[in-house]
Image (spheres, rainbow, N blue to C red):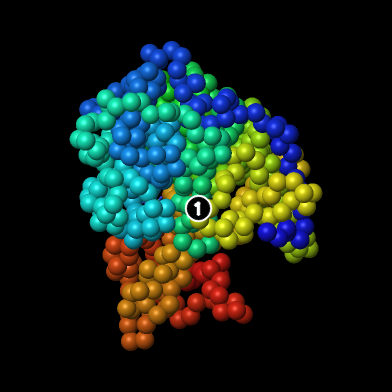
Amino acid sequence: MDGPQHWRTHLSPRSPGSFPLPEPGTLAGAWTAALTPDPDRPLLWGLVGGGPARWVTRGEFLDRTVAAAGRLSAAGLVAGDRVLVSGPSTVDLAVAHVACLRLGLVVVPTNGAYREAELAHVLADCRPRAALVDHDRWADLVTDLQPNLLVAATDLQGLEVPGGSSGVDGPTPELDSAGPDDPAIIGYTSGTTGRPKGAVLTQANLLAGAHSVRVAWRWTDADRLVLCLPLFHMHGLGVGLHGTLLAAASAVLQPRFDPDAVLDAVEAHAATLFFGVPTMYHRLAGHDRVSGLGSLRLCVSGSAPLAADLHVRLADRAGVPVLERYGMTETVMLVSNPYEGQRRPGSVGIPLPGVDVRLGGGDDETDGPTGEILVRGPNVFAGYWERPEATAEAFVADPDGGDPWFRTGDLGVVDDDGYLSIVGRAKELIISGGLNVYPREVDDVLSLHPAVAEVAVAGLPSPEWGEEVVAWVVPAVGHECPDVDELRSFAQDHLAAYKVPRRVVAVDVLPRNALGKVTRHELRLPD
Ligand code: MCA
Ligand code: AMP
């Protein structure tokens, strides 16, 4: 845990010192406290219990979480057990997630686009006791990969309970007794290097993450969110769902992004909030009904940079001043443009309440004002699952002896008035449509193709996806360079579709530095 050579700007936290969290200091406990009053108020709209989409009230939701927790407990799961959860966004999935957290189980949200090898890595790494999965053939797949796993759908259909009863008649297990420092979620992320690592977020980390945006964005129980982000990443889950439940607000869950469905829901449900990734805003901005967003109180963008011209287009076409914010799986949310005050295109704004942000860096003369964004606060994760070395590398010591700082791997600059802009990444990462692609993972798969001698993958700018995955290939001796269709079909058994290259460039050599390491930033399209 070495410190950077220099410490640059320190952005004062909006709430210096402590940022008190709602009682009892755990996410599950705070939810129960928030949702217990007024049990008849609508909470979530979505598919429930195999039936059509409908509103579920706070009272019904809490009752369903108690019943689900009872069944999970009767099936033998105990606090600390990991449970892999993956499915389209439904009320059932939200119930399962909350039931797990109320029981002290550790949820491992997992992208439903994963192929067998990606799923196998997650299972082998975190060794869950159960998997609640709704995708075609996933029940068989996870059973093959880990035969001793308890497997069920997210509505718990198929969950084996000893004695054969449904488990609901047994004693109600103790709920909401996890402590603030108990793990609640393991979120898989590429981080800065290596294969996906599990970021362990505690009950308090998740509570701090949801609470800070609730305060900053003036999120109240009068709000209604249209939530079409997947519930297996921090944006949809840790902000959209967790924030809704904490604010005792309401949300319309949509299983996928469809601009028409979003605009219909905004109108039909008198929504006030929409959260999306820039690709969603790009598609909405080109929609002839985009002005429908204008009735919302707040539109938030994150997970990838929102192009300044897209920000301006949305303001012009829909009258929507999108609020851009910045976060990470390891930290939930960090920095946000202000709710009141200027929402500056191209900037992610100022630190969220409770979050401490500063820039570290190397050499002042060569780096100029740019520095690596370093953060700390109650929202920052506890470490990577069973990876002490990666955890140690991810933090730097505080020069004043305070809490260590988490290295985001993102590069930033700070304006004179304290607005942070992300200007690059120190880590090798492509963000396509808000989803992270770790280039080495793709290199490793493509290099197995017999016609590929060497390969390196990098991201190129794309108006729709933000960045597009492109592969530079040195063909093997005596082989033609495989075309994009060939490489895509070769890779699709091993990699989720969003990681598969959209373009292939044949080259004679790959650019390398003196140590022989490929310099991805030098990969270019041919003139
Ligand atoms: C789908 N495809 C993609 C992507 N998504 N390709 C590249 N990048 C993607 N992100 C593929 C599909 O598999 C399909 O491939 C083809 O593109 C066209 O699919 P389409 O139907 O147009 O896509 P879609 O289903 O509409 O999905 C686009 C999407 C989705 C809605 C933008 O990617 C999405 O929901 N992204 C949000 C992800 C997210 O929640 N990120 C937050 C991470 P084929 O034609 O081969 O079948 S959390 C995070 O980053 C931190 C905490 C933060 O700050 O928020
Ligand atoms: P993830 O690992 O999926 O949590 O992705 C986190 C990464 O997404 C961050 O480290 C940033 O590189 C990126 N990110 C999130 N929000 C923004 C934003 N508003 N602008 C630029 N990059 C962002």
Left or right for 76, reference 166: right
Residue 121 falls left or right of residue 153: right
Q: Nearer the viewer, residue 275 or 290?
A: 275
Judging depth in this view, the residue of 434 and 495 nearest the camera is 495
Q: Amino acid at mark 1?
A: Trp
Q: Is mark 1 within 8 Å of ligand 2?
A: no
Tell me where residue 23 appears, x and y as whole percent: 57, 25
Residue 293 in the image: state x and y as whole percent.
Answer: 45, 29
All told, the count of numbered labels is 1
Residue furthest to the left in view is: 164
At a point 36% along the width and 86% down the height, the residue shown is: 477
- Report whether 434 appears left or right of 395: left
Q: Is residue 43 above or below residue 325?
A: above
Q: Residue at x 61, y 52 (%)?
A: 408
Give the residue displayed 33% in from the left and 87% down from the top: 478
Q: Is residue 20 left or right of residue 109?
A: right
Q: Is residue 290 visible?
A: no
- The residue singled out by tag 1 in the image is 385
Crowding near pointer 1: few (<14 within 10 Å), some, many (20+)?
Answer: some
Secondary element under disc 1, as helix, strand or loop, is loop
Question: Above or below — where is 408 with respect to 486?
Answer: above
Look at the picture and state if 520 lies above or below 146: below
In this rendering, does residue 30 appear at all? yes
Identify the image quadrant of the N terminus: bottom right
Q: Where does the image place residue 5, in percent across and percent down from the top left?
A: 76, 61
Where on the picture, by quarter, is residue 12?
Answer: top right
Q: Position of residue 249 (x, y in %)?
A: 46, 22
Q: Residue at x 63, y 36 (%)?
A: 352
